[in-house]
Amino acid sequence: QQPVQSPQAVILREGEDAVINCSSSKALYSVHWYRQKHGEAPVFLMILLKGGEQKGHDKISASFNEKKQQSSLYLTASQLSYSGTYFCGTAGNAGGTSYGKLTFGQGTILTVHP
Amino acid sequence: DGGITQSPKYLFRKEGQNVTLSCEQNLNHDAMYWYRQDPGQGLRLIYYSQIVNDFQKGDIAEGYSVSREKKESFPLTVTSAQKNPTAFYLCASSIRDGDTEAFFGQGTRLTVV
């Protein structure tokens, strides 16, 4: 079962912030975040493992709340290069039936205008 | 250079024909995955493999088949039983399951006419 992302689309002006959410109905072992430009392969942004961790690089960061089975991606002071479709991917716990099964959400289209 | 290669980039087939999409990686990764991408539906998992000679069905396996006879290769066959085969297909690999970065190939756009 795919994780659910929200919102489906976001339109920003350069310099504005955005939050993309990802939730799952199943227990999670890890959450991945990727960005895909049109016609290209998805590119890895970061991965968070269970333990409530938060990660970030540059102006993009993410949090993972394993109890709520949710993750959020935070984009601050957006740049034109941030435009693309963002996907969260989730993998289940070791020993569970979904372990090793990397499943992605339906994507959030982010458009940054000058 | 290490990477994951899908071929061909574009593929056209007549309805009713089976077609095999190639996916090769030289990253020495154990896990490999096949996804289908349709507009508005994100990446849907077709099959995944955690180790050579073993693979599991994903969420939309019907009409597809795979093999994993070698660590570096994970070909996907789209059979005539797949009702809507026209789509963008992405292959990915990772060192191991779930907790490591997945690397994606450039994809194969399959059009069935």
Image (cartoon, rainbow, N blue to C red):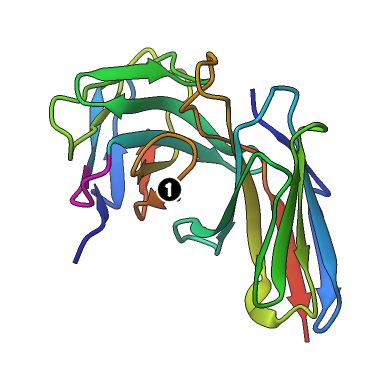
Residue B70 as seen in the image, left or right of residue A40: left
Q: Nearer the viewer, residue B71 or A86?
A: B71
Horizontal and vertical percent position of residue B79: 31, 18
Residue B24 higher or lower than B64, as above or below: below
Task: Name which residue lies at 39% across and 52% down.
Answer: B103
Residue B60 as seen in the image, left or right of residue B113: right
Label 1 neighbourhood size at 10 Å, few (<14), some (14-19), many (20+)? many
Q: Nearer the viewer, residue B97 or B74?
A: B97
How many marks are shown on the rendered structure? 1
Q: Chain of mark 1?
A: B
Query: Where does the N terminus of chain A fall, quadrant-wise?
Result: top right
Residue B9 higher or lower than B20, as above or below: below
Query: Where does the C terminus of chain A fall, quadrant-wise?
Result: bottom right
Which residue is identified by label 1? B102
The outermost residue toward the left is B70
Whether residue B26 appears in magenta in the rendering, the answer is yes
Would you say residue A94 is visible in this rendering? yes
Would you say residue B112 is visible in this rendering? no
Task: Name which residue lies at 21% across and 61% down.
Answer: B2
Residue type at tag 1:
Ala
Residue B64 higher or lower than A56, as above or below: above
Horizontal and vertical percent position of residue B50: 33, 27
Q: Quadrant of residue A31?
A: top right
Q: Secondary structure at mark 1?
A: loop
Horizontal and vertical percent position of residue B91: 36, 42
Q: Nearer the viewer, residue B87 or B30?
A: B30
Horizontal and vertical percent position of residue A22: 75, 42
Whether residue B64 appears in magenta in the rendering, the answer is no
The outermost residue toward the bottom is A114
Give the residues in magenta: B24-29
Task: Name which residue lies at 64% across and 37% down.
Answer: B41
